[in-house]
Image: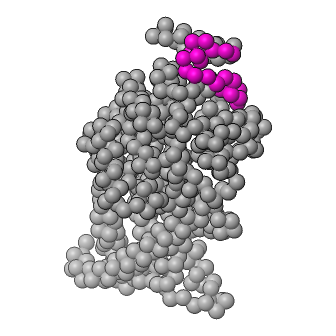
Amino acid sequence: MDFGFIRESIPLYVDAALLTARIALIGILLSGMIGFICCIIRVMRIPVLRQAAAAYIELSRNTPLLVQLFFLYFGLPRVGIVLSSEACAVIGLAFLGGSYMAEAFRSGMDAVSKVQIESGLSLGMKPMQVFFHIMLPQAVTTSIPVFCANIIFLIKETSVFSAVALADLVFVAKDLIGISYRTDEALLMLVIAYLILLLPISIICSLIERRVRYAEFGNAGVVSGH
Amino acid sequence: MKESSILQINHLKKSYEDGLAVLKDVSFSMEKGEVVVIVGPSGCGKSTFLRCLNLLESVDSGEILLNGKDILKDRKEAYAVRQKIGMVFQSYELFPHMTILENVVLAPCLVQKREKAQAVLEAEKLLERVGLLEKRDAYPRQLSGGQKQRAAIVRSLIMHPELLLLDEITAALDPEMVREVLQVVLELARDGMTMLIVTHEMEFARAVADRVIFMDGGCIVEENAPEEFFQYPKSERAKQFLNTFHYEALEI
């Protein structure tokens, strides 16, 4: 193990990690928005858009990110749309993540009982008010573990970005191996880089999970009666 | 049809998609300030009937006149109608992500656009009345079933409904909590609240009702003053129904 080499290449990994993190962040935020929009379309049963959302979700979930990226990076230029590596990565991640987030919202929405909705309606609330004040807060809380799993999954999915020539972590590692033949060091650092990126998020997620449960639904320690 | 009827139902019919008729031609009317209790065996359509009145179920034909206006005609008016007809559910249905106070003030602020401070003030007054003021900042999870149901009643009351529908509100409660909830309802009755109540608590029905309606097989079979109904039921089916309760009473 050549520690001098490792020390020298740290800045490269830091840059790549920052790039990965930035794209992951934007991609995940967009995923959440797409998921939320799909969720509204489904709950409100908007015709046409509903079928479109269903088609999108199936397309997105049933094709690998790598294939989606190839389509964006190599396919679209054929019809005159040229996107940068970064744009492809963000769009690809959002396209993939959107369906996962939509499903997370949906499972949360499904968990809200019908009578909850009716009790909102019986107070004179309109469907949109029921959606935002009764369904959504409960759905999001229920789905937080799924959101967290999705976030981690999407960050890990960024490892295929090098396929569209984006200088992410995997790209840097492969580059270093190509230049210096120091495979062990380069790959070890790759593992460590991902762990540094993901472990804190994993921990924060489980903390949020616990927090929100208590804050939203009251402390389980003082339950009495039913 | 009397002039003062707050609620007048004419020939209400409803069947489910599989063709099963739940309500077969139900007609009935209620005066302002009257408390009517509906009893009957499970599946007789009494809960469905209440749900129709709150426009939670669609109906096949018939009229529901609230203060002389047919609420079935304009479905867009449903939101306005539901503000006038409060409903309390068997399973309380407090919103689990809100404190008791938030549960109570949500609809007045959101639906009736009332001022928050004023709504909170009224909510506190109502909560105090049902003995829940100290629970104002608790979450539903932290309350007992009886407390939750009292809070649910308050949540309906703050909307100032002209008519309150209570759908088996003690059916999910432990026996010792039934009383505290029914006490609240008795007090409301004394204060002149117009209520239509579905219940299996016969003693309570007797105490609270101005009139008892016995439903079976989607029809109103018998309609009578509570003393008459419970002592001398006219129809054979009502007799049988009441006998089941006596049997159960002996068993306990």
- Compare residues A1 and B80 and report the one nearer the observer: B80
x and y, in percent, of residue B88 in the image: 49, 40
Whether residue B163 appears in this view of the structure is yes
x and y, in percent, of residue A7 in the image: 22, 79
Quadrant of the image occupied by residue B149: top left
* Residue B56 versus residue A198 in the image, above or below: above
Q: Residue at x 67, y 89 (%)?
A: A79
Residue farthest front in this picture: B3
Using residue B45 as the reference point, say whether residue B34 is left or right of it: left
Q: Residue at x 53, y 62 (%)?
A: A128
Whether residue A99 appears in this view of the structure is no
Indicate the quadrant containing the N terminus of chain A: top left, top right, bottom left or bottom right. bottom left
Using residue A145 as the reference point, say whether residue A71 is left or right of it: right
Quadrant of the image occupied by residue B184: top left
Is B226 one of the magenta-colored residues? Answer: yes
x and y, in percent, of residue B140 in the image: 36, 43
Indicate the quadrant containing the C terminus of chain A: top left, top right, bottom left or bottom right. top left
Using residue B64 as the reference point, say whether residue B113 is left or right of it: left
x and y, in percent, of residue A163 in the image: 50, 79
Q: Residue at x 60, y 61 (%)?
A: A44
Residues in magenta?
B214-235
Q: Residue at x 42, y 41 (%)?
A: B153
Is B146 one of the magenta-colored residues? Answer: no
- Compare residues B163 and B179 and report the one nearer the observer: B163
* Residue A155 versus residue B154 in the image, above or below: below
